[in-house]
């Protein structure tokens, strides 16, 4: 399955457009659209980003250009540290975290390609700054994401903190060598396409009020998610009020698996709804709870 996206860069009232970017650095002017004019290569030991968005209401339009990393531990392409950012038209390759979020509320990541990264979009929980909420990740392509030996992550990793009001919709995930999406609370996962994902397409950890609907998952989830739990295309661990409906799951081990905490059996995936899913050619169970 392929999607065709047509995106036009338009002027928005109050947004200064057309500031060219040809090298790594800080994007520090609020209400500004920055446009990449060349491919960028970024080699770093750790804990640095090529582009730092540290002002509000900033758009980064890569204009079809690429950002290349070297897979160093905690190497980032774009670091969003302010609200209302937008990242579009980029191709990211060989980063342990291509786009990272820290207090990047109301941000949009759309129409990008992520190749051979550990995490395409990653939240950065901080004890001194709030996590990101109301973030939209849509119409992106994630391909061949691979775990780094020193970094545990999924293509979209937004758990371990208070990442809420997430909209993850209409993305493609192919040949993922880990979980494709790892989330916690108050998320909508809608209309995504997953193919050849080794672990879970959607992994929900200790979350609540999450909707996973109208997704297609094919030839995925043959590797156990870990921690003593089996393989499953949609896996919810110790989560409540999870809605899993109208998904199509073809060829895997378990279709939907709602799990309890092995260390705290009373903490299960309670008050959840699983229904109207089309599950076929699974080796174990369509739905298990």
Image (cartoon, rainbow, N blue to C red):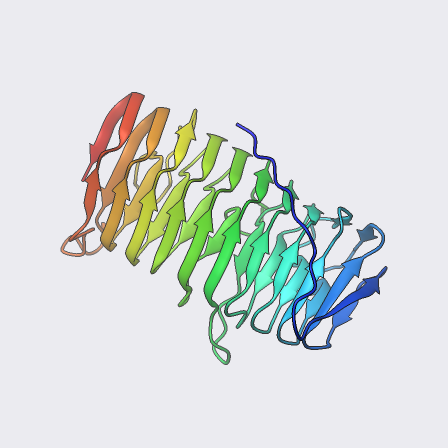
The correct choice, above or below, for 18 with respect to 9 in the image is below
The image quadrant that residue 78 belongs to is bottom right
Instruction: Identify the residue at the far top of this view.
Output: 281
Identify which residue, 49 or 209, lies in the foreground: 209
The image quadrant that residue 99 belongs to is bottom right
Q: Is residue 64 left or right of residue 147?
A: right
Identify which residue, 126 or 63, lies in the foreground: 63
Identify which residue, 215 or 119, lies in the foreground: 215
What x and y, as percent, mark residue 139? 55, 45
Q: Residue at x 32, y 26 (%)?
A: 253
The correct choice, above or below, for 146 with respect to 89 in the image is above
Quadrant of the image for the C terminus? top left
Q: Residue at x 47, y 76 (%)?
A: 130
Instruction: Identify the residue at the far bottom of this view.
Output: 128
Residue 46 appears in the picture as rendered: no
Q: Residue at x 61, y 40 (%)?
A: 5
Q: Is residue 209 left or right of residue 192?
A: left
The image quadrant that residue 221 belongs to is top left
What x and y, as percent, mark residue 240? 22, 56
Residue 13 appears in the picture as rendered: yes
Q: How many labels, in total?
A: 0
What x and y, as percent, mark residue 20? 83, 63
Q: Residue at x 59, y 61 (%)?
A: 100
Q: Is residue 156 left or right of residue 90?
A: left
What x and y, as percent, mark residue 98? 64, 53
Q: Is residue 17 left or right of residue 220?
A: right
């Amino acid at each position: 399955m392929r999607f065709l996206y047509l995106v036009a860069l338009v002027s928005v009232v109050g947004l200064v457009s057309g500031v060219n970017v040809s090298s790594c650095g800080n994007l520090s002017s609020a209400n500004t659209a920055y446009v990449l004019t060349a491919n960028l290569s970024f080699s770093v030991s750790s804990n640095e980003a090529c582009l730092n968005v540290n002002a509000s209401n900033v758009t980064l339009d890569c204009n079809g250009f690429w950002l290349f990393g070297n897979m160093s531990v905690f190497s980032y392409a774009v670091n969003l540290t302010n609200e209302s950012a937008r990242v579009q038209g980029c191709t990211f390759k060989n980063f342990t975290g291509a786009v990272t979020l820290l207090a990047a509320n109301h941000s949009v990541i759309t129409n990008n390609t992520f190749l051979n990264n550990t995490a395409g979009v990653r939240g950065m929980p901080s004890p001194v700054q709030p996590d990101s909420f109301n973030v939209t990740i849509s119409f992106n392509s994630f391909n061949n994401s691979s775990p780094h030996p020193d970094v545990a992550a999924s293509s979209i990793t937004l758990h371990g903190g208070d990442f809420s009001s997430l909209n993850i919709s209409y993305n493609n995930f192919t040949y993922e060598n880990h979980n494709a999406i790892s989330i916690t609370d108050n998320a909508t996962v809608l209309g995504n396409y997953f193919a050849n994902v080794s672990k879970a397409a959607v992994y929900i950890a200790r979350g609540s009020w999450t909707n996973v609907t109208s997704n297609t998952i094919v030839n995925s989830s043959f590797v156990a998610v870990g921690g003593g739990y089996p393989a499953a295309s949609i896996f919810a661990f110790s989560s409540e009020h999870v809605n899993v409906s109208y998904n199509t799951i073809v060829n895997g081990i378990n279709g939907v698996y709602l799990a309890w905490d092995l260390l705290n059996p009373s903490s299960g995936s309670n008050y959840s709804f699983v229904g109207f899913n089309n599950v076929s050619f699974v080796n174990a169970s369509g739905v298990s709870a």
